[in-house]
């Protein structure tokens, strides 16, 4: 009987100790929670919309190279690249005057224009891009279809083959910039503009020949 009472006393003490520990855990001081890092990545468009800085990840910007583009067509001369009379019937310079409301209409008989562009003073330049602005107020179905470009190191068409780069021209009012790979250098270039074979006339907008200069 004494042994049984002893077991009861021990069990009671254990129960009391368990309650005390539980109470201490519930009411006693707590360790500070570990911080949780949450990174919210937002694109620049959302950042510009005025969202709070507290949810925008801050990063050190990578310094960009200072660049400047010059329009090589501004002081260039233009002639027919092939032995034809297109220079007498088309004003090539109106394709490079920086005005989208001065444009040419390629007739169905010609189908295309082949233009020789010679840079000012016959100086060689690195050609990095060709920018095109479609003709203003023209039905997209009547716009020129494509353009081919060849960089001419000596400013003349040569017997040896040179890389020809082809681009599809936009059939809309949206301007496009076409990158010229390899930073090829030349004293001029050959441009072939192809019309829409289904149209009686194909209208051509404005070109800019760009050379990108990287500042030291």
Image (cartoon, rainbow, N blue to C red):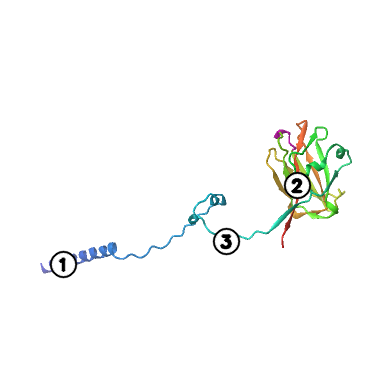
**Relative vertical location of residue 35 with respect to residue 164 in this rendering, above or below:** below
Calculate the distance from the C-alpha at mark 3 to the C-alpha at mark 2.
35 Å
Contact, mark 3 vs mark 1 (Cβ under 8 Å): no
Question: In front: 79, or 166?
Answer: 79
Q: Residue at x 72, y 60 (%)?
A: 215
Q: Residue at x 78, y 44 (%)?
A: 97
Q: Quadrant of the N terminus?
A: bottom left
Q: Secondary structure at mark 2?
A: strand
Residue assigned mark 3: 60
**Relative vertical location of residue 67 with respect to residue 131 in this rendering, above or below:** below
Calculate the distance from the C-alpha at mark 3 to the C-alpha at mark 1.
68 Å
**Relative vertical location of residue 89 with respect to residue 73 in this rendering, above or below:** above
Judge the density around disc 2: few (<14), some (14-19), many (≥20) Cα neighbours within 10 Å.
many
Q: Which mark is residue 9?
A: 1
**Relative vertical location of residue 114 with respect to residue 200 in this rendering, above or below:** below
Magenta range is 139-144
Report if residue 69 lies within the magenta region.
no
| Left or right of 48 in this view: 173 | right
Q: Secondary structure at mark 3?
A: loop
Return the x and y of residue 95 as percentages of the image width and height. 78, 42
Of pointers 3 and 2, the one earlier in the residue sequence: 3
Residue assigned mark 2: 208
Q: Secondary structure at mark 1?
A: helix
Return the x and y of residue 21 as percentages of the image width and height. 26, 65
Q: Please identify, in this view, whether the residue under mark 2 or under mark 1 is nearer the observer.
A: 2
């Amino acid at each position: 009987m004494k042994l049984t009472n002893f077991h009861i006393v021990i069990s009671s003490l254990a129960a009391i100790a368990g309650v005390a520990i539980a109470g201490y855990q519930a009411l006693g001081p707590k360790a500070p929670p570990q911080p949780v890092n949450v990174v919210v990545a937002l694109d620049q468009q959302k950042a510009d919309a005025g969202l709070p800085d507290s949810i925008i990840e801050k990063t050190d910007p990578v310094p960009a190279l200072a660049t400047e583009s010059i329009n090589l067509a501004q002081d260039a001369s233009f002639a027919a690249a092939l032995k034809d009379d297109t220079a007498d019937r088309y004003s090539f310079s109106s394709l490079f005057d920086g005005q989208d409301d001065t444009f040419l209409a390629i007739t169905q008989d010609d189908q295309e224009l082949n233009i020789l562009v010679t840079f000012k003073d016959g100086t060689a330049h690195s050609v990095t891009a060709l920018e095109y602005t479609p003709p203003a107020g023209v039905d997209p179905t009547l716009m020129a279809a494509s353009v081919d470009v060849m960089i001419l190191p000596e400013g003349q068409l040569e017997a040896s083959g040179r890389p020809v780069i082809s681009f599809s021209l936009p059939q809309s009012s949206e301007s496009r910039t076409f990158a010229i790979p390899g930073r090829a250098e030349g004293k001029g270039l050959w441009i072939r503009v192809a019309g829409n074979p289904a149209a009686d006339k194909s209208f051509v907008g404005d070109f800019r020949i760009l050379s990108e200069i990287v500042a030291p």
